[in-house]
Image (tube, helix red, strand yellow):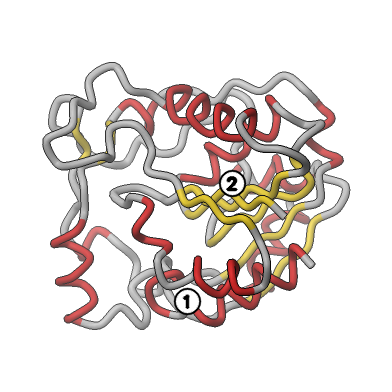
Amino acid sequence: MKIIMVPGFWLDASSWDAVVPGLRAAGHDVEPLTLPGLESRDADRSGIGLRTHVDAVVERIDASEGPVVLVGHSGGGAVISAAADARCERVVRTIYVDSGPLGDGGIVSDEWEGDGSDLPLPAWDAFEESELRDLDEEARATFRARAIPHPFGASTEPQRLSDERRYEIPTTLVASSVPVTVLRELIDAGHPWMAEAARMRDVEIVGLATGHWPQLTKPAELTAVILTAVG
């Protein structure tokens, strides 16, 4: 199976380095992506918005043969939502890692402060303790050293979706910093964060108790979750 992996904010393709080998060992064709503007700290991020990132993923879908599974972490969930919407006939499963699908008109976040076209990794106290679980001081230092400013426009440009066939695509939600029970309650209540997921026909929720970055804190366990979802 072709698996395209989209990182969350401040991360490039290397953030999946501890997950990719296990997927490839199982016989899958895995392509972790570095989104436009995340190539380096010195990259030009002006003019890059959410749609720029979506188009980059759609381009990789079009360059692939056969069915495709999309994996999106955190803000990458919004990206794979729109990429699946654009290529409903090609995407056979979406996997959201501590994330969820973003509906039409939604934005990823308006809580972060940008520096022009750059959105730097904020101080750790900007995150909830549940998000930082298992991310020890050494891991935090490594994360910050490798973090790349995210294109500010990717967090504020509204999502644009048009094909309701996206609701037929089987979906896996990996709940790591939020308990499975809480996520189910949000979906059942039609909470704005999970309104798009509530409209999907086939959604499974898998718990992976750790923080917001399981690809860094529990990569073996995340690999197993993805293999089960794909299999």
- Element type at mark 1: helix
**Mark positioned earlier in the residue sequence (1 or 2):** 2
Pick whichever, 135 or 45, lies toward us. 45
- Name the image quarter holding the N terminus: bottom right
Looking at the image, residue 79 lies above or below residue 62: below
- Nearest to the observer: residue 1 or residue 226: 1
- What is the C-alpha distance between the residues marked 1 and 2? 26 Å
Of 167 and 127, the residue lying toward us: 167
What x and y, as percent, mark residue 225?
65, 73
Above or below, 210 relative to 155: below
Q: Is residue 129 left or right of residue 28?
A: left
Q: Position of residue 187 (x, y in %)?
A: 72, 54
Query: x%, y% of residue 199?
Result: 80, 41
Indicate the position of residue 192 as horizontal and vertical percent values. Answer: 62, 42
Q: Please tell me the numbered disc located at residue 193.
A: 2
Q: What residue sits right under mark 1 in the picture?
A: 219
> Left or right: where does residue 133 sit relative to residue 143?
right
- Name the residue rendered at 66%, 23% in the picture: 161
